[in-house]
Structure formats: structure tokens, C-alpha cells
Image: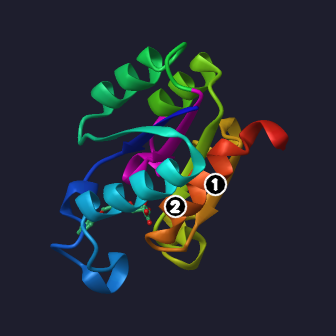
């Protein structure tokens, strides 16, 4: 099983800024934990980050026929991007939405996800564990 992890704007700053909200773990360290969990479960991982909405849309489009599941931390685009939502809908690849923080316990504008209606499900609020839990969810996506 091939998993595509997509990380959206500003997640490249993890571990360097706002540790009280997002912790001290860097995105590279999260990637290592994801790879470790995926190896245990026999899954392959491609792990990417971009600050560009169009690039993310292109990666989602290109995932068709290549990846079995997309795991998406859409970051701020969660709350704004019709383009990402339409791309997910168009590919038809099962997509799991993840967030480090509990977006529902934060500002009201973070309560609304434009992505959620086209996903298989969400994992929010578990910090770095949201990513490793997503590996488990992804390899079991067809058992739902
Ligand atoms: O909790 C999450 O994973 C979020 O997707 C993080 C996004 C936020 O806009 C979403 O509402 C929830 C923000 C990612 C920005 O990451 C930073 C990391 C360090 C310093 C500044 C921003």
C-alpha cells in the first residue's frame, strides 16, 4: 500500500516557532516517525510539504493510479481552499484529514473544514500522534 502525506502552508516551520501550540517536533522528525510506523505495517510513504496551493492541487491530481491513500494536513487551506477540496473529490482517492491541534477547541474560523466532506475521516488534536494514527487508519481504510 502506498501512502501520500501532504503538508500544507507553514508546516515547514514546525519545531522552530509557536512551540506552545504546535510542539517542538520538526516536520523532518514527524516524517521519521511516520516512516517507522509505516514500515512496521508494510506501507510505503511519500512525504511532502508545500506552501503553494497550486502545487498541492497538482500533486493530488497526479496521485491517481499511484497512491492508495492520501493523508492531508491542509493547514490554513483546510478553512479556505475549494481548489484542494475539488482536487480530492476529482481523484476519488480515499483521503484522511489530519491536524496536530484540536481545531474545534481553537478560534471559530478553524472549526469549519472545506475538506472534511470529501474525506474518509478526520484525526485531530493528537499532536505528532495524529500523523502516526493516520498511518494506522490509512492501512485499514478498506476495512471501514
Ligand atoms: O493543527 C494543525 O495541524 C493545523 O492544520 C495547523 C495549521 C492551522 O492553520 C490549522 O488551523 C490547524 C497551521 C500550520 C502552521 O504551522 C506553524 C508551525 C510553526 C509556527 C507557525 C506555524
The residue lying toward the viewer, choosing from 133 and 43, is 43
127 drawn magenta = no
Q: Is residue 136 above or below residue 88?
A: below
Q: Looking at the image, in which quadrant does ligand 1 appear?
A: bottom left
Q: Position of residue 8 (x, y in %)?
A: 34, 46
Q: Residue at x 65, y 21 (%)?
A: 92
Location of residue 69 (image quadrant): top right
- Disc 1, SS: helix
Is residue 41 visible to the viewer in this orientation of the structure? Answer: yes
Residue marked by disc 1:
136
Mark 2 and mark 1: Cα distance apart in space: 7 Å
> Which residues make up the magenta segment?
68-81
Q: Residue at x 19, y 62 (%)?
A: 13
Q: Position of residue 75 (x, y in %)?
A: 40, 54
Q: Residue at x 43, y 42 (%)?
A: 5
Residue marked by disc 2:
132
Q: Which part of the image, by quadrant, shows the N terminus?
A: top right
The residue lying toward the viewer, choosing from 10 and 16, is 16
- Disc 2, SS: helix
Q: Is residue 74 above or below residue 128?
A: above
Q: Position of residue 132 (x, y in %)?
A: 52, 61
Give yes or no for contact between labels 2 and 1 (Cβ–Cβ under 8 Å). Answer: yes
Amino acid at each position: 500500500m502506498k501512502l501520500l502525506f501532504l503538508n500544507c502552508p507553514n508546516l515547514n516551520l514546525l519545531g522552530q516557532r509557536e512551540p506552545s501550540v504546535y510542539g517542538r517536533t520538526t516536520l523532518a522528525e514527524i516524517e521519521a516517525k511516520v516512516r517507522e510506523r509505516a514500515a512496521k505495517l508494510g506501507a510505503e510513504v511519500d512525504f511532502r510539504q508545500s506552501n503553494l496551493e497550486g502545487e498541492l492541487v497538482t500533486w493530488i491530481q497526479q496521485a491517481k493510479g499511484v497512491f492508495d491513500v492520501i493523508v492531508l494536513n491542509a493547514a490554513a487551506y483546510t478553512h479556505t481552499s475549494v481548489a484542494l477540496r475539488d482536487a480530492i473529490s476529482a481523484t476519488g482517492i480515499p483521503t484522511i484529514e489530519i491536524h496536530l491541534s484540536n481545531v474545534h477547541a481553537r478560534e471559530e474560523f478553524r472549526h469549519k473544514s472545506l475538506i472534511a466532506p470529501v474525506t474518509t475521516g478526520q484525526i485531530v488534536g493528537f499532536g505528532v500522534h495524529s500523523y502516526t494514527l493516520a498511518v494506522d487508519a490509512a492501512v485499514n481504510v478498506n476495512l471501514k
